[in-house]
Amino acid sequence: MHSAEGFGRPWFVRICALGFMGLCLGLGAWGNATGRVGIAGPLLDPQAWDGRELTLSLVEVRAIEADSFEVRKGAVTLRVMGPTTGLEVGREVDLGGTWRADTLSLQQEWRTVAEGRATKRRLGGFGLVLLLVVLPLGLRWTERGWVIRG
């Protein structure tokens, strides 16, 4: 008897893959809807978030004004009140502050520019291409489905 008998059956692998994808999508949707993930939470229910500390990671600067700037993550744009020195449109920043429901904005308390993001993105793309090239070399098709060579 083969020790990984279930993994050779295509229906088993498909069901597991679909279940995992459904779990990931469901958790992502729940996180965005509750504001536990992403920056949408304060905009969905401003009064509930009033006065709460927020930390935004790797948000893109979209617009800069004299005393504020806008950041975006995905499809959500948020206004940040605070100094704009050293900011450039298109740069990614990490920042933190207090949510203000009266102005629908984040009062910035700290900010750091995320350095090297373009290089990290290129390395991630290279890794994905490498995986797509190398992975098929380590698999072979049998009458029972895909199996690891060896």
Image: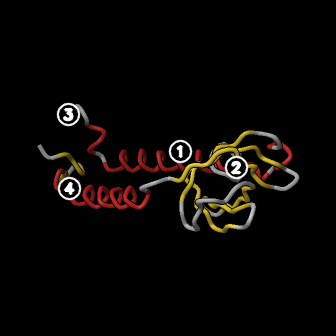
**Amino acid identity at mark 2:** Ala
Give how far across and how far down residue 25 sits, in percent. 55, 51
Q: Residues within 10 Å of mark 1 (few under 14, many from 20)?
A: few
Q: Which mark is residue 34?
A: none
Q: Is residue 85 left or right of residue 1?
A: right
Give how far across and how far down residue 31 sits, in percent. 64, 45
Separation of disc 2 and disc 4 at Cα?
A: 38 Å
Q: Residues within 10 Å of mark 2 (few under 14, many from 20)?
A: some
Q: Which residue is mark 3?
A: 2
Q: Are marks 1 and 2 in contact (CB under 8 Å)?
A: no
Q: Earlier in the sequence, mark 4 or mark 3?
A: 3
Separation of disc 2 and disc 3 at Cα?
A: 44 Å
Identify the secondary structure beneath mark 2: helix
Q: Which residue is mark 2?
A: 33
Separation of disc 1 and disc 2 at Cα?
A: 15 Å
Q: Are marks 2 and 3 in contact (CB under 8 Å)?
A: no
Give how far across and how far down residue 97 sits, in percent. 71, 44
Q: For marks 4 and 3, give the one nearer the viewer.
A: 4
Separation of disc 4 and disc 3 at Cα?
A: 26 Å
Q: Which residue is mark 4?
A: 134
Q: Earlier in the sequence, mark 4 or mark 1?
A: 1
Q: For marks 1 and 3, give the one nearer the viewer.
A: 1
Q: Which residue is mark 1?
A: 23
**Amino acid identity at mark 4:** Val
Image point 69% across, 62% down: which residue? 69
Note whether 27 is above or below 114 in the view shown. above
**Amino acid identity at mark 3:** His
